[in-house]
Amino acid sequence: MSEIQKTSSNQDNTDLDKPELDNAGKASKNIVAIKDVSFGYGPRLVHSGLNIDIERGSITTIMGPSGCGKSTVLGFIGGRISPQKGQVIVDSKDIASLNNTALYELRKSMGMMFQHNALLTDITVFENVAFPLREHTNKTEQEIADMVLDKLEHVGLREAADLYPEECSGGMQRRVALARAIVMEPAIVMYDEPFTGLDPISKGIITQLIAEMNERLNITSIVVTHDVPEACEVSDQIIVLAGGKALGKGSPEELMSSDDPAIKQFMTGAPDGPVAYHYRSQSNESEGGH
Amino acid sequence: MKFLVTPIQKLGATVIDLVYSLGSIGLFFYRILSALMTPILRPALLFTQLYMIGVKTLIIILVSGLFVGMVLGLQFYTNLVDFGAESQLGLLVALTLVRELGPVLTALLFAGRACSALTAEIGLMRATEQLDAMEMMAVDPIKRVIAPRYLAGFISMPLLAAIFTLMGIYGGHLVGVSVLGGDSGIYWSAMQNGVDFYDDVLNGFIKSIVFGAVITLIAVYQGYYSPRNSEGVSSATTRTVVVSSLLILSLDFLLTSLMFS
């Protein structure tokens, strides 16, 4: 995919929307670079020497078996989780070197759709989507209403603006979360398991919306999912994680035709293969126990 | 040797946990203090919480205050009559409420009604990733969620204690004077002559401020750091009520010994 420069219409974040320039004065090709990252929860090592590059303007899907640390990667990019080793570079900024203020400033150029939507339950759909605008911009009520209703129109929920999250179905809540993630028109949008628990129609709608928003708003999309068909439909690049590393990277076609048994097993959903189904504790693994 | 080492290890672990918790709550308190300008500059956030925390606790405070005062009126009057000292009823009821029962019972009720709700609400926001979502939207939850709630609790508690005390004094009057036949003028004049503004009213007010500051801090801390599951939120809520109640009673002794001894 050709490099796409961010040209946001959001005037309050003009500085944030400008990609940082490298030494040659050009915007770096990769908006996210994860370099040799290791991370574990207690004795359990989740990532060991993980390397991921995400191209500006692309849709990248991170896949892998449960517990392989897919969502953790989003935590690294958003600065919510610090790796124990290695570097996470987002928009040419080393996340570990940022202080709290700088990190929050960087997050203004990110949007995130959480696995369980994480909508604020005491305010309406409209207010949920308006939340980042109210917090970070000085827009008038009319401007906020225009932006929010525009985003709700795109996700097909303009008439649900006055509902509370609890009054919406799972699919509707997912679309509200998507509208909230893109309302600031950020440079990067992260989707954590956007298809989980949705019916086929809702899955199709979300898939379409991710592609559409990426194209229309010139954003970089990072999707974490298990769903192979949806991932293949929407992605420019798929990264398969397993065993703490990126097992394979490439376009959906390249991965579907890969000869690597682990990638093949994951892409076809085969029960038998090199990726273990049974959970192994760290001590058991090191002893080669059963 | 194991029977000797294990208890020592456990004691050591408990002490380390305690020191860690104190350090953690101290840092958390510092973060709240640093964030207090947000609810001051955005009063809508504060007023919403004053309503949720203060106004919604008002009914239980009014009713409890009235009944506590009525019980005091009944008990004191029936005993004072035996000694011909029923003229001191107003003074006794007022001093008991202003110095002790007003701040202490209000704080206990506040912990049970408002603080438990605070912990559960913040804990659920943590469990349902609402606080994480705010962080990812570059909104500091300490400023947006915690500081307004803390300030609202801090403001509400002394006001509720004052209302509790007033209701108690009225309840004492209702039983001691209206029902049992004591003299109304003596009830109020004994109170007016015997209750000192600085020694009694102000000290009682300071107590309620201290209780409010401490138990609201416990509530928001427990909620903010509660584990991300239903059992964790439930335990955090229980811990808020238990720890707050114990702190109220122990701090009351400490403050009383400093103020009135």
Image (tube, coloured by chain):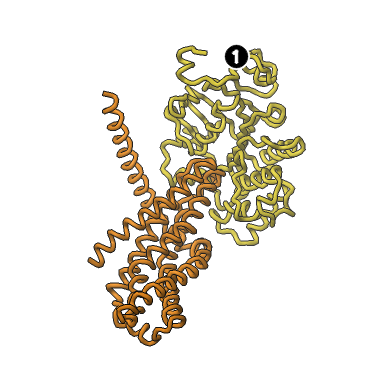
Chain colours: A yellow, B orange
Residue A207, by quadrant, is top right
Residue B207 percent coordinates (x, y): 33, 64
The residue lying at 34 percent from left, 66 percent from top is B100
Residue A215 percent coordinates (x, y): 68, 39
The residue lying at 47 percent from left, 24 percent from top is A45
Residue A70 percent coordinates (x, y): 56, 30
Q: Measured along the vertical axis of the image, is residue A253 above or below residue B99?
A: above
The residue lying at 34 percent from left, 81 percent from top is B86
Left or right: residue A247 compared with residue B83: right
Task: Tell which of A90 and B116 is nearer to you.
Answer: B116
Task: Tell which of B83 and A160 is nearer to you.
Answer: B83
Q: Residue furthest right?
A: A201
Amino acid type for the residue under numbered disc 1: Pro
Residue B74, by quadrant, is bottom left
Residue B215, by quadrant, is bottom left
Res. A5 in view: no
Q: Measured along the vertical axis of the image, is residue A227 above or below residue B145?
A: above
Residue beneath disc 1:
A274
Task: Tell which of A219 and B164 is nearer to you.
Answer: B164
Q: Residue furthest left?
A: B261
Left or right: residue A34 compared with residue A179: left
